[in-house]
Amino acid sequence: MTKIGITTTVPLEILIAAGYQPIDLNNVFITDPNPERLVDIAEKAGFPLNCCSWIKGIYGVCMDYGIDTVVCVTNGDCSNTNMLMEVLKLKGLEVVPFAYPDQPLPKLMQQTLETLATTLDTTLETANVVRGKLKSCRDLVVKLDQLTWKDGLVSGFENHLWLVSTSDFNQDYREYHQQLQELIVTCQQRQPYPPETLRIAYIGVPSVYAQDLYRYIESNGARVVFNEIQHQFAMSQSGDSLAEQYSNFTYPYSICWRVKDIAAEIKKRQVDGVIHYVQAFCHRTIGDIIFRDALKLPILTLEGNNDFYLTQHLKTRIEAFLDMLERNRKGSKYNQQVLA
Ligand code: SF4
C-alpha cells in the first residue's frame, strides 16, 4: 500500500479503501527517539519559535521520513495546517486538503466524505466495507477503555496509547487488533488499582510529555481514567454510517460538543479532578476559559511547548493539585460523617 501522511484524525476508512496506508504524522513525531531533532528541522527551514511544536514536528517528519503525500485538514483542526500545507507543496509534496463541515450534520458529512472518496478515486461503498473491518478494532478499544475506568486494570498511559493510535491503527489494523487482544488478556489477569486512587480526566490535545505525565500522576496516588481527545479518536459512537460516525466526532466542531461529552464522561467515570493540557501558541488554549466555566470540578491547566519531559515546576504544580484533590475528598467524607 502507498503510504499517506495525515495531520490529525481523518476518515481513514476512505484512505484505506483507496489503497493507501495512513500514517499519523503526530504519532511518528512524538514516538521518535529524538523529537527535538524534528522540531529543529522545521526551525532551520524558517518555522518561527512561536509556532506550535506539533506543527513543526509534522513538518520535520515529512522531511526526515520521506513522506511524499499528506492529507491536510484545513477546517476543524488547526489554522496552522493551512500554511503548513502551502509549505509542503512548495517542498514538492502532494497534498490532499480535507475540510470537516462547519456543523456535525450527517447530511453535510455525507457530501464531504463523497468528495474525499472521489478525490482519492474510490467509493463510499468500498469505504463502508473497510469500516466493517475496523469495527472489531474499535470494539476492542471500547473494551480496553472500560477496563481502565470501570475495572481499574489498565493504566492511564496504556489507555492513552491505544486510543490515540486509532487515528492510523499503528499503520496496520490487523496487527493492532492482535496486539490489543493480547494486552486485554494480560490486563484481565492483573490486580486492580486500589479503590482510593484519585480519578483524573485528561482533556485537551495529547501532550508532548506522553508517558512522563501519566507516570508522574500515578506516582502521586492518582490515575487518568478518561483521555478525552484520544477517546474521541477511537470513535466509540460509530452510528449507523460513516457519515454518522464522523458527525459524532466532537473534536472538529464547536467546543460546546466537547463540553457536553466531557461533562457526561466525568460523571460516568466518577472523576475527582481535571487536567487540561494546552499546547503553547495553540488557539485551543483559549477554550480553557469555557471549560473552567462549564465543568464543575477542580481543573489544573498545564501548558507544554518543546520540553518533552516534565520540568520540576510542572511536577510541583501537579503534586499540589493532587494534594488538594485528596484533601477535598477527605473533607467531603468528614462532612458526610458529621452531617449523617
Ligand atoms: S496543538 Fe493546536 S496549534 Fe498545535 S497542531 Fe494541534 S491544534 Fe494546531
Image (cartoon, rainbow, N blue to C red):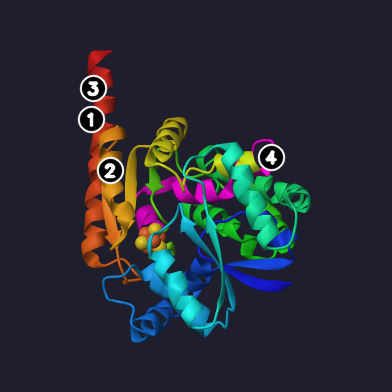
Residue 340 percent location from the top left of the image: 28, 13
Judging from the image, what secondary structure is the residue with disc 4 in? loop
Mark 2: amino acid = Ile
Q: Which residue is mark 2?
A: 299
Which residue, as the protein is rendered here, is positioned at the far top? 340
Q: Which mark is drawn over residue 80?
A: none
Mark 4: amino acid = Ser
Q: Which mark is drawn over residue 241?
A: 4
Are discs 4 and 2 less than 8 Å apart at CB?
no
Binning the other alpha carbons within 10 Å of mark 2 as few (below 14), some (14 to 19) or many (20 upward) gives: many
Front residue of 120 and 45: 120
Q: Is residue 176 visible?
A: no
Are discs 1 and 3 less than 8 Å apart at CB?
yes
Judging from the image, what secondary structure is the residue with disc 3 in? helix
Horizontal side, residue 117 vs residue 197: left or right: right
Q: Which residue is mark 1?
A: 331
Q: Which mark is drawn over residue 335?
A: 3
Frontmost of labels 2 and 3 is 2
Q: CA distance from mark 1 to mark 3?
A: 6 Å
- Residue 67 shown in magenta: no
Binning the other alpha carbons within 10 Å of mark 4 as few (below 14), some (14 to 19) or many (20 upward) gives: few
Which residue is rendered at x = 40% and y = 69% of the image? 83
Frontmost of labels 4 and 2 is 4
Among the two numbered marks 4 and 2 on one chain, the one whose residue lies closer to the N terminus: 4
Asked whether mark 1 and ligand 1 are closer than 8 Å, the reply comes as no
Q: What's the magenta region? A: 213-242
Which residue is rendered at x = 28% and y = 55% of the image? 302
